Each structure stands twice: as structure tokens, then as C-alpha cells.
Amino acid sequence: MLEDLVVGLAGSGGDGVVSAGESLLGAASSQGFYAIMTKSFGSQIRGGESSCRVRLSTAKVLNPGGVLDVAVALNWEDFRRFGAELPIGPDTVLIHEAKAGAPPTDLAPPGQLAKEIRAVPLSELAKSAAGTDRAKTSVVLGVLSGWFGVPREALERGLEKKFAKKAEGLLEANRKALAAGLAFAIENPLARPRALARPAAPSPKLLCDGNEMCASAAIFSGCEFFGGYPITPSTEVMQILSRELPKYGGVVLQAEDEISGVGAAVGASFAGKKSMTATSGPGMSLKTEMLGLASLAEFPLVLLNVQRGGPSTGLPTKPEQSDLFQAAFSAHGDVLRPVLAPTSVEDTFSLTVEAFNLAERYQTPVIILSDQEIAQRKETVDPIDVSRFELVERLRPTEEQLAQGYERFADTPTGVSPISHPGMKGGNYLAAGIEHDRKGAPTASGSVHAAMNAKRFRKLDPLQDRADLFQHEGPQDAPLALVSWGSSAGVAREAYTRARARGLPVKLLVPFLLYPVAEPVYRAFFASVRRGLVLELSHQGQLYRVLRMFVDVPAGVTSFARSGAQPFRTDEVVARLQAQAEGL
Amino acid sequence: MGPTVGIDIERLTLRDALDLAVLVEEEARDRYREFAEQLAAHDTPEVADFFARMARIEDRHRAELLERRRTLFGDAPSTVERKHLFDVEAPGYDGARAFMGVRQALETVLAAEVKAHDFFDEALPRVKDPELRAFFQELRDEEVHHQLLVKAELARCPEKTDDSEAYADDPVAQ
Amino acid sequence: MESFLAPADYKSPLKPIWCPGCGDFGVVQALYRALSAVGRSPHEIAFISGIGCSSRIPGYTTAYGFNTVHGRALPIAQGVKLASPDLLVVVAGGDGDGFSIGGGHVPHVIRRNVDLTYLVMDNQVYGLTKGQLSPTAARGLKTVTSPYGSLEQPINPLLTVLAYGAGFVAQATPADMPGMTTLIEQALRYPGFSFVNIQSPCVTFGQEEQQLRAHKERMKPLASMGHDPANQLAALDLARAYGTELYTGVFYRNPDPPPTYDALIRERQAELQRGEPRPRARVLEAYLRS
């Protein structure tokens, strides 16, 4: 029995490949499986090549998986366009539309082609059962049910979701198509049986993507204002909030451009409200000046950057982890702002809550560095107990402080000075991007500037000790290290487990707080380390570089990094760790 | 459109007129104080001091008028307010310049005195009450007197134009 | 609520950096008076500006001020007003801040009809940075960045704002202090986006023929020309003379002001909240599958 199954489907946009994947995902999660689903498309808005990948497991799924266990190709041209995103291997069950003929010889490297290749007359079965060849993906679902044990009723519920609101008769037709596929599978069993085990005790799970999780966490955290602009792959956050936030008395402004969006959010923060914006790399570039303004004027602000391939317009629909330099360093002048990175849909919730807390506590912009894979993949998540979260409100001046001559930028020991907002009597002050004294009056004095910079940096000192914003696994004294962040961490976690199972003396570090670099945490981690890898998806290996700016990274720890749209696979990471271990 | 708003000259009582006169001096005093501050901040100390002196003079006039008002009318509430006045005797903001010379400052003051004179002079035909007329005439004639003083100082002022500006550094971009 | 707050209550102790003779001194004076007439307490006023000499103005008032970045006062002010609609929101800046770098935001704040008052101190020059060409400068003007004379037609701020549908558009000059004070007060009171273009000369870099004494001679009050401010077309026609004539007064005041963006949002929020939304703490229930 299989505990884990990775299914990849590819066809053209009109085939409904992604809907089929969603039905599969829905069925799996309702049966208590953990699952992750990712999608990939060509560049047309409709009708281009379309694929999805669904990984189901009885245990928590850490990443979308590598080589497919099951590949479904509705035609070969579209399947091939996805290349390394849908890798097949000798153990893959390669299912294809019978009419498409035998697989092209160059589909996989020599000796790597799937040993079990099954031509299925999907079109024919669809036509005879449902009256149209469009129902072929429902046939596919039936075939998957028959060969891999995905429960039929669960799949049918998925069909209900898709077709319930469409023309009458479509649902019934597709049920028949599913039945036809199932019958075919039973009559033509696999050479090697591959049934999925059932989860031990199915429990209700959340099913959503990273953008939905982030929007939900923002609502939970008490966000009252969102200003933004559409940009792939973050737009969903604005869409969800524009529907939901007004229900809580909040405001969403789709502004005329990226700058205006974040500007409005800065204004809302000045007005005393928790506020947020969301964008991707190109939008962050435009928002840079506002980031600097929020930093100098010491306003809380949360910015979600769903990273995509860069630079410039780059690859709008693909993940990359190449905006770390920008998140940490952009905006002229000496600025320091926290950068948090979720690694999964699940921790997008807690890290978004943390982002709002840090923003409010330290009166600073905070960047959440997500990426396209996390933001747009659907993931099953065990229900989150929100009662364990503390929500932080900004420090406001007391009645006494207001009565005694309030100084907005008082030089307090922590560096955090109480912040008033319009409407608060006695708290009137001048906020500005120009350097200012304790009262907010503009100044060009070097000593005041130095003191203010020191204040703005000092207030973030406590982040150096936030070991709770890191995941450590493995023995304290292990000499081999694996460090990773963002979506790559999902692969790193799996690689770590497999490497340990093979006896490699490896330990794992996943930072959720990327910047400022918490030097004590890294010093403690690297103390025993002689070799290792920093795993991330960017041409420059940006975290590796940033760590080397602030920490003595052992010489034997190297960067394992490459450009986006080519996610890491667990097996290649394990192989690299193995090679590193040999050098110990 | 004159320099007062919301004041009906024809309905003014003597008390109103005294209150008006007090405010006229107050407005002028405040403006000269502003000029003194601006010029001190823009490195024109001689004229800054001059305007500070003007402010003190206007303040004295104000105090004298206020004393008269109190003697005649005590602390009865006033119906005339600052919001009714717009630079009756106060020179317009245009009257100050960085690095201005004393001659130029005197010309600013002179223009202000002429303005005030004209205000009272133009009001006179509309004032019926004899006591009030007498008061306005007095105020008008005071302005004439002030103008003479200023002209006298101007005459004493060196004819050559002030060339502080020529010595000053170029403006600084911010 | 008529004021017990005097103009002096709106004046902050900060000394202006403006050159003596700057038109902005008159503007801020008129603003103190107008605010006093309107009577909102300083702590209920948010005064947002961009970057430039005139953008320093919030610091010279006792309101909550925010001196933001070049060209972005309007977007930020929008955020302030939408987040806190009970505040009186005033926005100020120069012609470059508003119509050059900030130009992209103008149409949108206007078409949304956010209830704020935008005061532009128009002096056809970039004063703070020493005299460069500004978008409202006449063609042919020689400046440090147009040493042979500008080859560009100026933008017409009055026509622009009118064309985007603003409900209150006026022009003023410190040469007429009572007039300017009244116009600012009317703009503050107008329920919706209101705009006052203030010809506020720069004594250091501005043209000689643009100084206040020239204004006194050239200004033509619209009221004395028989203009009806409810007539939008007539307003547009008069606005075309920007640069040649100095018309002062109200060009256009919408006799039937449409609902403001902030009011519409509040209405919608009330409607949605009547549906008893799920409490914030239970937000994830929307994604629970069983």
C-alpha cells in the first residue's frame, strides 16, 4: 500500500485539467489525506497548455514532490512543454490518451522512461458515456479511482462542486464518464498494483492556498485597511479582503498604482489603523520610497511580497526566491526592517500574525517574503488553534504623557516611543520623511540624526534573540548542516529526514526571520558545523550571501542555489548532502 | 474690497471704533514681529532690529488706545474681532525681503502708514456721529504724523541702495 | 460648530523656512483664519503634504501633520481619510509636487470624490531645489533647466481638475487676503473633493511679473464678472485663460454635491455588517473541509 502518491496531469486549457486536479484534491482531503496541489500554465489567459500536480499522503505533505508516481498526458505536445516540472522516471505509471499514440522517444533520458505505460481511450470513453469528448478528465478521475484506490464517492463530490451550477445534465453526464473510467481501470488492472493506503483517523482539515491564508490571518490580526494594486501572483489577497474586510468595518482600496496603494496604507497607519499591502517583486520596486518613509516616520505597516521570477517583469507565474536582497536592503539610507518568510500554506498564517505583531510592536514596516508556489498551491492544513496567538497593539501615549508635553519620537531606552494618531487630543505632532528631533520638528543636525538612527535600529535589537522564529532539527553537535527558507524549506525538511534515515550526521535550520540576521542563533547553529548546504531558489543564493555578511559561515558550507521555476527535488538534495558528508 | 470684512462703518459706535483701532495696532505689531523673526532667521539683523522696534512702537499705540477704551467703556465685551481685519495697518507679507536694507524697510512702513491713513480717510464720509468722526480724524491725522516721521528717517537714510544682497551667498537647494 | 478656537490656536511654534516675502506666508495666515472659522479642533485635523517649500506648511500648524514624499500626498491623504473618515483632511503642495510627479494621482482622487481639500501653491517654479522649470511655467520661460527657454506648453491645473469632475474649484492669491481666506473656508466646508489653486509667488526664483504687486493689478474676481459658479461649462471656458488671466474666486461649485467616497464606503460597510459576518477569530472556518 502506498502512503504517498504524486499525480501529474497535463493537457490544454480547454480540457479542464486543473479542475480534475481540484476534484482529486478535494476528494483526498475529504478522505483525511494530506495533500498539496500546484498548477502550471502557458502564457495564454485561456486555452494554453495547462497542468497540475497533486501529492496525497497519509502523513503531512512537506512539498509538491519530485518525480511523478502517476503522469497523465492528454496529449504529448502540452505534456512536453512542462518539461522538468513534470518529471517521469522508471517507476512512473504513464497514462496517456490512446489517440495520442506512443510517447515520444525523448520524453525522458535514456533508461529513465516509465516502465508502465498505459494508453487509455479517454476521448472514446467520454463520448460514449457523456456524449462529449470534453468529459475526458472525468474519465481520468475514474481511472485514478480504479487504479489507485481514490474513493469514487469522494471524487463524485468534486464533480458536484464543478458542475452543480452549470447546465443541467452535465453533472450526470460526467458521473457516467467517471464510472466508465473506473470500469476501464477495473477491467484492465495495472501490472503492479498501486493502491493508496487509507489515512488512520481522518479528521477535518482546512484546504486553502497561501494567499487565502495570508488574507485570513490579516483579518484575524485586526487589519483594518488594505491598499494595493493587482499583480500576479498576489492579487487574490486583495480580492479576498475587498470582499471580507468591509464586513468588519475595514477598507480596501484598489489604488491607481502600486505607489498609491502602499501610500494609502501608510496614511491609514498614520491614522492609527493596522494596515497592509500585497504585491510581487515589480511592485516592491515601486514601493521602495514609501518603505523608507514608513521606516523614518516609524509607522507600522505589513507588506506581503509574493516573489516571482525576476528581475523586472521576469516570470510572473513561477516561484523564485530572489527578492531577499531587496527586502532587506532596498530604500536608500540606513534602514532596518524585519523580513519574515513562510515556508508553507500552514505557517503563512502564524507568520502573517507575527508580521502584524512585529509591525505594531516596533513601529516599522515588516515584509512577508512568500513566493508563488506557497501563495498559489492548495494545501491541506490541520485546523489551527488561533487562541494561542497574542495580538499586539501599538504603544499609545497615556493620558499623562499627552498632558505633559507629548514627544512622538522620545528617545526611550527600548527605542520604541509611544505613537499617537489624528483624533487623539494632545498627541498632535508632525510626521515626516525628513529627519526630525524628538518632537518631530525637521532637523539637519548630525548628532540628532545619529541619535535617531540609533533609536530606529535599537528598537529592533530584541529580534537578535528570537530563536523561536527558527526551526532547528537534529543534534546540537552535528557537523553537517542544511539551511533553507521559503518554499525550498519544504524540500529541505524531507531531504533532512531521508538523510538522517541514511545515517548522515545532519542538522536542519529553517529561518522564518530572515532579516535582521539573528547572529546569536546562527553562531550557535554553525558552531559544530564543518560542511553543509544553504538551499534556495535564486541565481545568486541570496540568503547565503546575506548570512556571510553578518555571520562566520563555515567555509565548508556552500550555496546550493539556482534560478527559479526549477524547484528542488528531495533526491538531489539528499545526494548533495551525501557528497558533502563524504568530505567530513 | 477693503481691508476689513464684516464691519459696517456706518453702524460703528465709538466703543467699536476704539476696539477696531486697538486691533489695527495689534495686527500691525504682530506683523512687524513676524518680519523681525523672518529677517533674523535670514541673516538680515539690522532690519530685523528695525522691525522689532516698529513692533514695540505699534504695541505702545495699542496700549494707549486700549487705555482710552478701558477708561470710557471698561471691560464691556467687544464686537470687533481680529477676523474682521485684513492688514489695515499691517504691511503685506510682500513687504519683507531677505537682505533688505533699512531704506527698503522704511518704504514698507511708509506704505503701511499710507494704507492706514487711506482706510480712516475713506471711512470718514460714512461716519455720521460727531464724536466718532472726531476720533477717526484723529486716527487719520496720527497716520499723517507717522508718515512724516518715516519720511524724515528716509531722508536721513543714505541714498545709495543697500547692497547686502550682493555680498550674500547664492541660495541653497534643499 | 462655530469656533471658540482662534486663528492663533492653529499656529505652531515652528518658524517657517520660507524666504521673507514668500506668498506662502499669506496662505498659512489665511489657513489659520479659515480653520478657525470652520472650528475643527487641531487634533481632529490631518494635514498632509508632499515635498517642496509649500509642503512645509503642515509643520507650521498645530494639526496632526504629515510631510510625506514628493508627489504622494494625495494617495497618503486618501488612506488617512478612508481609515478615519471623521477627520478633517487637508492636503497641500506645490505645482510640481501636484502636477508633475504627483499628476498620476490627481484624476483618481477626484473621480473617487474623497472628501478632502487640496491646496496647491502654484508659483510656476521649483523653489526648494533652486529654480528649475515647473509644469505650470509658460512656454519660453528661461530657468536653470531651460536656459534657452522652455519648449513645453504648461499644464493647466484649473482645466485639469475641472475636467476630471471636481466639485469645487477655485483660484486665489495672497494679494487678496480676505478673498483667499473665504475661498479656503468654502473649500474646507465643501462636502467632497475641493481644490484651490493659489498663485503664491516665489520671491527668490519667480518671475518679476508674477510677484504679488503684479497680482494686485492683474487679478479679476470672477464674482464681479457675473460668473455663475454652478455653470461647469462656463467654468471650463474661463479656466482656459490660465496663464494669461488671473481670475480669482470660485470657478465651479457643484450645486448638488454627489456622495463622497468615504460616505459610500460607510454605507456599504453598514449594509455588510448587518449580515452578521463571522467573527474575525473564526475566519479560517471558511476553509474547513470535512
Image: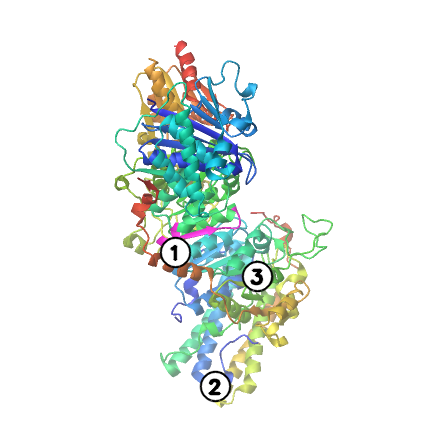
Report the chain holding disc 2: B
Residue A345, position as x, y percentages in the image: 38, 35
Q: Write the start and end of the magenta stretch as one range.
A: A244-257
- Amino acid type, mark 3: Gly
Q: Which residue is mark 2?
A: B11
Q: Is residue C112 magenta?
A: no
How many angstroms separate mark 2 from mark 3 (CA)?
34 Å
Residue C51, position as x, y percentages in the image: 53, 50
Q: Secondary structure at mark 2?
A: helix
Residue at horizontal 44%, vertical 48%? Answer: A168
Residue at horizontal 37%, vertical 26%? Answer: A148
Q: Which residue is mark 3?
A: C23
Report the chain holding disc 1: A
Q: Secondary structure at mark 1?
A: loop
| Residue C288 in the figure: left or right of residue A377 | left
- Amino acid type, mark 1: Pro
* Of the pair C148 and C285, the residue shown nearer to us: C285
